[in-house]
Amino acid sequence: MSETPNSNTQGPKQPIAAQAAKAPELIPAGAKPTGRRGQVGIYLGKLFRIFIYEKDWKFIPMAALIAFIVAAVVGRNLFRSMEGTTIGSLALVSVCIWNGFFNSIQSVCRERAIIKREHRSGLHISAYMGSHMIYQAFICASQVVVSMIVYKAMGVRYPAQGLITPWFLSDFFLTLFLITYTSDMMALMVSCIVKDTTSAMTAMPFLLIIMLVFSGVAFPLKGAPSRIANFTISKWGIFAVCTLGNFNSLPSTALMSVIRKLGGVPLVGDVVAVITSPEYAYRFEMWAAGMVQKPEYAFTAANLWKDWGILIAIALLCAAVGTLILENIDRDKR
């Protein structure tokens, strides 16, 4: 006599197809408009429900915490000297890239089986990706606003003049937003490519290392590495921040710091005392700054538009690649 299996007893692991059959739909049954615009609205509503009920909002206070740490370390000299702005811009851009990567690195791959099923039932991949792009723009904008408030509260002194708009804060917001959003789109593309969330989280550290190494700040780049850097978010993000911060008008303090250390050396102490006096110190710092000015950091709207344009192009390219990959999801045997 055969025994009836106990419903509480855990059976063998179900195959992926069986899991997908029981998974919640991206678009509820009976509410599948043929138009892409209608599907964008439906799925966007689902994403915002996830934001509220599944605590996706936690990315925003996390961004505030990271901004607090960075401002505490580099905020004092940001936009006050060339050296402080160089290191500070690398830190700000790293925060934006970190936030953007974490926002969406698992967004698509964690529901890959559901996407495959819904695509066969009429889901437009362009509508699916479009809703993600709108939702991620909201997340990125919220993170940037919170971060800017934290920077201000921590004593970062913002310049008064903008380049594209009359206000520095609006240009600064757009710059940080574009860096964060472009990073978000790159992570979304990776999420479309990889098999599962484990692979996505494995890929993210490599992307972060590439952004750091090819930023051009941490390590000098020449030849092929310099050309590779042209395809990184970090390079153009740092260019944009330094341009907006009017890098070339700031004093250079590196040489003066070395000279001050020579104050106790016999024979040169008197010369050092004169150079480091209030009457001459600032002039010497500005003279030193003139030797290391960079044309790519010039305070011009053309420079900033170029940096913004490249970031936008990278974001659109990543979104397009991710969409093309998902369009062929039915052929994916994973």
Image: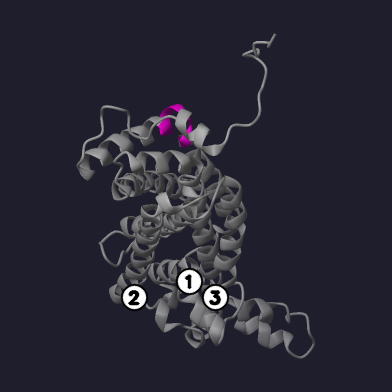
Judge the density around disc 2: few (<14), some (14-19), many (≥20) Cα neighbours within 10 Å.
Answer: some
| Residue 284, x across and y down, in percent | 54, 83
214 lies above or below 188: below
Residue most extreme to the top: 1
The residue beneath circle 2 is 303
Q: Overall secondary structure of the magenta stretch?
A: helix
What kind of residue is marked 2? Asn
Judge the density around disc 1: few (<14), some (14-19), many (≥20) Cα neighbours within 10 Å.
Answer: many
Task: Answer whether labels 3 and 1 touch (C-beta < 8 Å).
Answer: yes
Q: Secondary structure at mark 2?
A: helix
Q: Residue at x 33, y 33 (%)?
A: 27
Task: Answer whether labels 2 and 1 touch (C-beta < 8 Å).
Answer: no
In the depicted view, which residue is nearer to us: 241 or 3? Answer: 3
Q: Earlier in the sequence, mark 3 or mark 2?
A: 3
Q: Earlier in the sequence, mark 2 or mark 1?
A: 1
Query: What's the CA distance linking mark 3 and mark 2?
Result: 17 Å
The residue beneath circle 3 is 216
| Residue 49, x across and y down, in percent | 38, 30
Q: Earlier in the sequence, mark 3 or mark 1?
A: 3
In the depicted view, which residue is nearer to us: 278 or 308? Answer: 308
Specify whether residue 77 is in view.
no
The residue beneath circle 1 is 235
| Residue 22, x across and y down, in percent | 47, 28
Q: Residue at x 73, y 84 (%)?
A: 269
Judge the density around disc 3: few (<14), some (14-19), many (≥20) Cα neighbours within 10 Å.
Answer: some
Query: What's the CA distance linking mark 3 and mark 1?
Result: 7 Å
109 lies above or below 300: above
What kind of residue is marked 1? Lys
Query: What's the CA distance linking mark 2 and mark 1?
Result: 13 Å
With 31 as the anchor, is 195 left or right in this view? right
Q: Secondary structure at mark 1?
A: helix
